[in-house]
Amino acid sequence: MSVFWMRGILIGYLSDKLESRSPVVGLMLVLSPFSLYIYSEAPADLTKNAALMTFTGTVIGGVASLISTAVSADLGRHPELANSKEALSTVTGIIDGTGSFGAVFGQVLVPIIMKAFGWKSVFYVFILMTILTLLCIIQIVYRDTVALFERIYRRIFSVNVDEGLINAERETTSVNQ
């Protein structure tokens, strides 16, 4: 239980620091298939299994937490939904309901897939689902990631105009003397 809320805090902190949620979601969705595959090949060692399960749970559970809480909160600030509690409630219900439906549907499919194709195929289905999820939101992730890198670039390489003028004036004064 403690790892669950700690990863939510860590992921929420990261998305708040970056001032953008979708790059964090995109990164986790890119890491998810790899972590699922590595976990599917995990040895029967308790320590390695626990470490891989924690990482896999963080990248997959972090996406679910971020989408169901932070995205709903962000939608609450959207101009079209801000003044309508009913619309916000409907959108939040759709997001949470879709996630719940997916969880229920997945639990029904796990034993069916396992019996028909073996345990590793369950992981491959999860890998496919995370890739499909990323494909569904790739345009938003790309747009927001480019905007994030542009913001970071501007912060790193921006020169304060007043400071630039002062330095130019100092150079001109020192040359004239």
Image (cartoon, grey):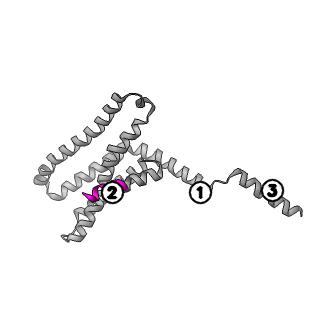
Magenta-highlighted residues: 1-9
Q: Is residue 7 magenta?
A: yes
Spatial CA span between label 1 and label 2: 29 Å
Coordinates of residue 157 in the picture (x, y in percent): 62, 56
Question: Which residue, given by chain and number where applicable, does mark 1 sit on?
Answer: 156
Q: Residue at x 47, y 52 (%)?
A: 18
Question: Which residue, given by chain and number where applicable, does mark 3 sit on?
Answer: 169
Question: Which residue, given by chain and number where applicable, does mark 2 sit on?
Answer: 7
Q: Residue at x 27, y 64 (%)?
A: 52
Residue type marked 3: Glu
Position above or below: 111 against 93: below
Q: Contact, CB < 8 Å: mark 1 with mark 2?
A: no
Spatial CA span between label 1 and label 3: 23 Å
Coordinates of residue 165 in the picture (x, y in percent): 76, 53
Q: Residue at x 26, y 42 (%)?
A: 99
Coordinates of residue 164 in the picture (x, y in percent): 73, 55
Relative to 25, 172 lies left or right: right
Residue type marked 1: Ile
Coordinates of residue 118 in the picture (x, y in percent): 14, 57
Q: Is residue 137 magenta?
A: no
